[in-house]
Image (spheres, rainbow, N blue to C red):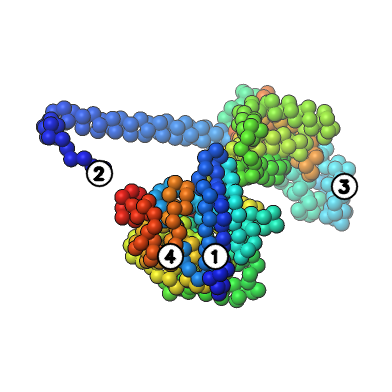
C-alpha cells in the first residue's frame, strides 16, 4: 500500500563508478579543504597566542622593576641628633606622632647631608626615607641610643638611573654611591596609595578601591540580573511588553560605558547626592553596566535546562518556585556564572564611567569605607601613564600586572565555583 | 479499594484547545481504581493530551484551554479550590523519556516526600526511599550505590527510578505517558511486570502506541482517533470484538 513496485518502464541506471577520475578529484578537493581549514584555525590560534605572549612579556619585563626599589645605606646617629622619645610612647598608637615631633625627619636629612655632601645630601633620599627610619626605630628602640646604618629608599631619579634610564647627572651620582646602593622588594608599593613621588606611590589604595567597587557591583548586579533572568524566562507572559523589555536589555548591554558614567553622574551624584569619588557610586554605576550581561547570559543558561526536568518536578507536585530554585537555577548556575565572569571582568577594566563620577581624583589614602573617596586600578593606570616623572613608567606597568593578577584571581574563583556546580545529565 | 460503582476519576464531555485548534472533542471516560486503563490510538490522536488533563500538566502550556468536568474521587480538579500542586502529588506522572534529576538515586526518590513533608525523620525518609525502590523493582540493583548519580543508570533503570520517584509521594493515580517507547524489549518487559505488580495499589492510566502492550498490561482500553474517544471498554472486548469499524481497522493494522 505504501511502497509501490518499481514500474518496468523505469530506465536502467548504470552502476556508480567509485574509482572514476571525477570521483578521485572530488576526494582530493575534500581532503584539501579539510587541511586548509585546519591550518587556518591553527594560524588564528597561534596569532592570538603570540599577541598574548608579547603582551605578558612586555608587561612583566617593564613592570618587574616597578616592584623593586633602590636603597642606600645611611649611617645615622639618632642620639647625637637628640631625637629622644621614651620607649613607652614608641609602642603606643602615638608613637609615629612622637617621633615626628622629636624632629626625626630633620635628623635623617642632616645625616644624609653629612654622609654624601658631594652628591646632594638629602636630595639623594626619597621623600619617604625618614618613614623607613621611623619604622626601623619602632621595631628596634635601641637605634635611638646608638649609631647605626639603615637602608632607606633613594630619590626617584637615582632609582631610575640605577635601573638604566637616568640623566647624566644622576648616572654620576649612582657611580659615586654604587657601593652603598642595593635593590630590594618595594613593600610600600603594596601597602601605600597614590603619591606625587613615584618612590612613595603604592597600589594598595587603587586595589582596595577596585575591590570595594567590584563587591558593590557583584552584590547588586548578580542578584538583580539572575532574578530578572529567572522572571523573564519562567514567569513572564509572552507578550509585547516582554519583547520590549528583552530588546531593551539586549540594547543596554551594547551601550558604550561612558554613557553609563554620565547616567551615574546624573542619577547618583546629582539626584541622590551620594558622595563623589566613592567606591559605592562606582560600584552602582558599573552594576548598571554589568546587569544586562548577566541577564542575557542567565536567560540563555535557563533556556538550556531541559524541559523534561521541569516536567519531572512539576509532575511530582513541586510548586513553580520549587521548580525554579530546586532544579532550574542549580542547573543553570554554571552558565550564569560564565556570564557573570564576563560581565565582572569588563567592569573591572572599565575606566570611562569611573572618570565621570570623579574616581579619577588624586587620593593619597586607601579607602576604609564604601563611601570614602577612592580610585580604581584601571583609573590609577590611566593617571600614572599620564605622569611626567620617569619613575611612573615602571609603576604603570607594575599596576597593570596587579590588575591582571586581580582579574585572574577573580576569574579563578568564578571558574572554581562553576566547576563545583557543573552537573551532567 | 473502591467498588466498581465509584470510579477513581471521571471525565465528562472534555474539550481541549491549543489556541484555535481543538485537540480533544467531547471525551467522557471513567478510570477505575482496580484496573490498568490503556489509551491507544495513532500518533497525534490526542491520547497524551488527554492524559495530561488528568493532572493538569496542560496548565503549563501557553494557550492550552480545557473545558468539561474532570473529577478525582468526586472532587472537581479544575475547581478554584483545588490546589494544583497537591493534585499532582495525588496524581503522579511518568514520562515518555526517562527524566531523573541530575542528582543521586536517593535524592531523586527523596525529593517528592521532602517537598511535601511526608517524612517525619531522616530514618523515615530512608525507609520511604527503600520502600519505593523495592516497589519499583530497582532496590536490588541500586541498594549499594544509592548515592551515585541517577543519570548514570541504564535507560530501563532510569525509567523504574522515575516510577519509584512517583510512588514515593504515595499517589492515588499514576499516569504513564508511553513509558516504554524509549526502552529496549527487555527493559520494556520489566516495566510491564512492574505495572502488573502495582495494579490495585494505584489506579494506573497508561498511554501506549504499542497495541500488544495495551493488550498485555491493561484491563480497560480506550481507543482515540482524531481527538475523539472512539471506543472504550474491557481490553478483551476491544481486541477481540470491537464494536466500531475504526477500532477494528486500527487494531488489525489498516492505519496507524
How much space separates mark 4 and mark 2, taking CA atoms? 32 Å
Mark 3, residue position: A98
| Residue at x-position 51% and y-position 48% | B24
Q: Residues within 10 Å of mark 3 (few under 14, many from 20)?
A: some
Disc 4 from disc 3: Cα separation: 103 Å
Q: On the rendered structure, is A399 left or right of A2?
A: right
Badge 2: residue crowd in 10 Å (few <14, some 14–19, many ≥20): few
**Is there one chain holding both mark 1 and mark 4?**
yes
CA gap, disc 1 and disc 4: 19 Å
Relative vertical location of residue A183 with respect to residue A306 in this rendering, above or below: above
Q: Do circles 3 and 2 both sit on a common chain?
A: yes
Quadrant in which the N terminus of chain B is drawn: bottom right
In three-dimensional space, the C-alpha distance between marks 3 and 2, rounded to whole angstroms, equals 108 Å
Residue B249 percent across, percent down from the top left: 33, 52
In the rendering, at what x and y percent does residue B248 appear?
35, 55
The residue where tag 2 is placed is A1
The disc label shown at residue B173, or none: 1
Amino acid at each position: 500500500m505504501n511502497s509501490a513496485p518499481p514500474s518496468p518502464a523505469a530506465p536502467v541506471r548504470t552502476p556508480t563508478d567509485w574509482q572514476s577520475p571525477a570521483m578521485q578529484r572530488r576526494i582530493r578537493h575534500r581532503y584539501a579543504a579539510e587541511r586548509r581549514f585546519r591550518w587556518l584555525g591553527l594560524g588564528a590560534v597561534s596569532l592570538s597566542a603570540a599577541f598574548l605572549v608579547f603582551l605578558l612579556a612586555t608587561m612583566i619585563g617593564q613592570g618587574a622593576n616597578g616592584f623593586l626599589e633602590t636603597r642606600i645605606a645611611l649611617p645615622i646617629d639618632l642620639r647625637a641628633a637628640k631625637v629622644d622619645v621614651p620607649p613607652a610612647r614608641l609602642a603606643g598608637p602615638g608613637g609615629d606622632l612622637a617621633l615626628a615631633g622629636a624632629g626625626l625627619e630633620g635628623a635623617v636629612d642632616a645625616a644624609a647631608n653629612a654622609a654624601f655632601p658631594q652628591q646632594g645630601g638629602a636630595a639623594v633620599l626619597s621623600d619617604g626615607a625618614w618613614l623607613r627610619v621611623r619604622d626601623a626605630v619602632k621595631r628596634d628602640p635601641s637605634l635611638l641610643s646608638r649609631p647605626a646604618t639603615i637602608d632607606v629608599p633613594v630619590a626617584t631619579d637615582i632609582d631610575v638611573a640605577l635601573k638604566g634610564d637616568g640623566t647624566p647627572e644622576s648616572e654620576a651620582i649612582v657611580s659615586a654611591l654604587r657601593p652603598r646602593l642595593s635593590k630590594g622588594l618595594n613593600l610600600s608599593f603594596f601597602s601605600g596609595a597614590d603619591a606625587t613621588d613615584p618612590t612613595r606611590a603604592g597600589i594598595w589604595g587603587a586595589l582596595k578601591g577596585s575591590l570595594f567597587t567590584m563587591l558593590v557591583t557583584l552584590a547588586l548586579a548578580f542578584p538583580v540580573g539572575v532574578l530578572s533572568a529567572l522572571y523573564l524566562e519562567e514567569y513572564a507572559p509572552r507578550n509585547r511588553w516582554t519583547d520590549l523589555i528583552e530588546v531593551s536589555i539586549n540594547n543596554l548591554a551594547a551601550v558604550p560605558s561612558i554613557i553609563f558614567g554620565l547616567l551615574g553622574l546624573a542619577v547618583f551624584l546629582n539626584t541622590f547626592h551620594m558622595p563623589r569619588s566613592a567606591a559605592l557610586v562606582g560600584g552602582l554605576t558599573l552594576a548598571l553596566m554589568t546587569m544586562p550581561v548577566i541577564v542575557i547570559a542567565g536567560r540563555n543558561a535557563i533556556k538550556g535546562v531541559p524541559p523534561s526536568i521541569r516536567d519531572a518536578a512539576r509532575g511530582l507536585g513541586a510548586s513553580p518556585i520549587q521548580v525554579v530554585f530546586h532544579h532550574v537555577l542549580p542547573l543553570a548556575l554554571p552558565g550564569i556564572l560564565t556570564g557573570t565572569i564576563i560581565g565582572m571582568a569588563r567592569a573591572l577594566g572599565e575606566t570611562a564611567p569611573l572618570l565621570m563620577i570623579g574616581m579619577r581624583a588624586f587620593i593619597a589614602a586607601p579607602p576604609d569605607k564604601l563611601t570614602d573617596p577612592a580610585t580604581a586600578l584601571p583609573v590609577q593606570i590611566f593617571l600614572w601613564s599620564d605622569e611626567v616623572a620617569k619613575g611612573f613608567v615602571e609603576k604603570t606597568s607594575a599596576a597593570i600586572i596587579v590588575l591582571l593578577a586581580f582579574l585572574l584571581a577573580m576569574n579563578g574563583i568564578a571558574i572554581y565555583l562553576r566547576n563545583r556546580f557543573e552537573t551532567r545529565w | 479499594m473502591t467498588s466498581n460503582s465509584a470510579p477513581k476519576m471521571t471525565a465528562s464531555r472534555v474539550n481541549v484547545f491549543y489556541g484555535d485548534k481543538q485537540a480533544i472533542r467531547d471525551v467522557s471516560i471513567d478510570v477505575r481504581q482496580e484496573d490498568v486503563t490503556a489509551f491507544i490510538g495513532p500518533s497525534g490522536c490526542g491520547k497524551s493530551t488527554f492524559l495530561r488533563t488528568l493532572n493538569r500538566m496542560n496548565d503549563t502550556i501557553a494557550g492550552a484551554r480545557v473545558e468539561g468536568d474532570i473529577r478525582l474521587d468526586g472532587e472537581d480538579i479544575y475547581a478554584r479550590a483545588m490546589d494544583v500542586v497537591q493534585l499532582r502529588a495525588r496524581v503522579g506522572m511518568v514520562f515518555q523519556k526517562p527524566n531523573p534529576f541530575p542528582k543521586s538515586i536517593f535524592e531523586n526518590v527523596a525529593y517528592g516526600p521532602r517537598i511535601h513533608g511526608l517524612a517525619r525523620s531522616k530514618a523515615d525518609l530512608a525507609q520511604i526511599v527503600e520502600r519505593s525502590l523495592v516497589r519499583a523493582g530497582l532496590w536490588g540493583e541500586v541498594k549499594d550505590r544509592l548515592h551515585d548519580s541517577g543519570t548514570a543508570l541504564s535507560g530501563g533503570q532510569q525509567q523504574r527510578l522515575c516510577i519509584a520517584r512517583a510512588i514515593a509521594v504515595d499517589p492515588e493515580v499514576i499516569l504513564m505517558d508511553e513509558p516504554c517507547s524509549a526502552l529496549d524489549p527487555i527493559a520494556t518487559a520489566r516495566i510491564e511486570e512492574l505495572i502488573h505488580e502495582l495494579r490495585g495499589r494505584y489506579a494506573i492510566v497508561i498511554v501506549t502506541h504499542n497495541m500488544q502492550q495495551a493488550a498485555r498490561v491493561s484491563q480497560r482500553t480506550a481507543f482515540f482517533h482524531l481527538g475523539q474517544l472512539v471506543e472504550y471498554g474491557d481490553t478483551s472486548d476491544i481486541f477481540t470484538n470491537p464494536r466500531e469499524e475504526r477500532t477494528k481497522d486500527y487494531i488489525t493494522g489498516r492505519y496507524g
